[in-house]
Amino acid sequence: MYDSMAECLLCPKECGVDRLNGELGECLTGSEPFVASWDFHFGEEPPLVGNGGSGTIFMANCNLACKYCQNYHFSQEGEGFEVTVERLAEIMLELQETTASNINLVTPSHQVAVILMAIGRAKKAGLRIPIVYNCSGYEKEEIIRKLAGIIDIYLVDMRYNNNEVAREYSGCENYVAINRAAVKEMYRQVGDLKTDDDGLALSGLMVRHLVLPNDLSGSEGIFQFLAEEVSRETSVSLMSQYHPAYRALTDEKINRRITKDEFDKAKRAFYKAGLENGHIQDL
């Protein structure tokens, strides 16, 4: 997969640039791992945290351009630093050797080739805890297919049920079909979420859905899709914590927190669809 960066088609934007020779596509990322930070994260969903926290590695830059991104400093403004593949593997092992319950790779899509190389090195050196692919959901199905047997847990956003909204607020095309195809492939690989006796996630699919103001996230359609085409037992994190950040501050449709009525509407859609496993973060 590494050689594919010579004409990069790793994500649905298919920029076609030669990242191996310094050309940059829309993600503005070269051929080496570009990392913002790593630490033990206790703010993830409970099945990912455990006693030791999720060993979270924030990859810098992104293949989306969300107007409301709360991590815009490193997702869109380039904060971060290059490390070698060897160093990225060492970071995974250091997190495991301390307290991490898993290795949580945040925003991995545009760096998946070098991440796979690092995982391979880390596993040869003794990495054994679950690997979490924590992504925006704007993924190529054929790339996700290549992760079978490597990724244990997919933590994937389903942000929109409308392509025009996705284009306006995340700068991407054909989000709905691309997102749904990727989610179905993830489920095919790992199935419903499986946990140990302490409730710690071992493998499976978790879907995150952030409720946006004015129903821009299209919750009802997303939940119907999950119930009808994936599994009624899909583990869904229904999130209420949206707050305007970055360029959302000047957009009248999204420059406010969501209301209780808006979140209650999303909850009703979740239950109406017949979904059974929700981590619901009430207002």
Image (spheres, rainbow, N blue to C red):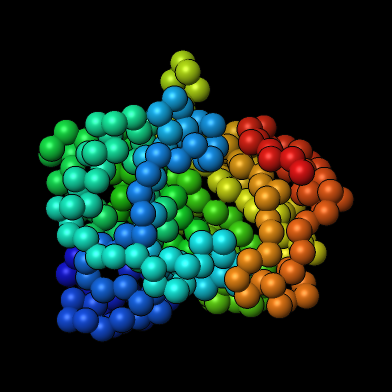
Residue 161, quarter of picture: bottom right
Q: The C terminus is located in which quarter? A: top right
Q: Residue at x 29, y 31 (%)?
A: 98
Residue 35 point in image, percent of width and height: 32, 60
Residue furthest right as drawn? 261
The vertical placement of 42 against 139, above or below, is above
Number of dots carrying numbers: 0
Q: Which of 7 and 51 is in front in this view?
A: 51
Seen in the image, is 136 located left or right of residue 130? right
Q: Nearer the viewer, residue 177 or 133?
A: 133
Q: Residue at x 71, y 78 (%)?
A: 250
Q: Nearer the viewer, residue 272 or 257?
A: 257
Residue 12 appears in the picture as rendered: no
Q: Residue at x 36, y 54 (%)?
A: 37
Residue furthest top as drawn? 197
Residue 1 point in image, percent of width and height: 21, 63
Residue 82 appears in the picture as rendered: yes
Residue 216 point in image, percent of width and height: 73, 65
Q: Which of 261 and 190 is in front in this view?
A: 261
Seen in the image, is 15 located left or right of residue 235? left
Residue 63, quarter of picture: bottom left
Q: Residue at x 43, y 62 (%)?
A: 139
Residue 153 point in image, percent of width and height: 41, 40
The vertical placement of 28 against 263, above or below, is below
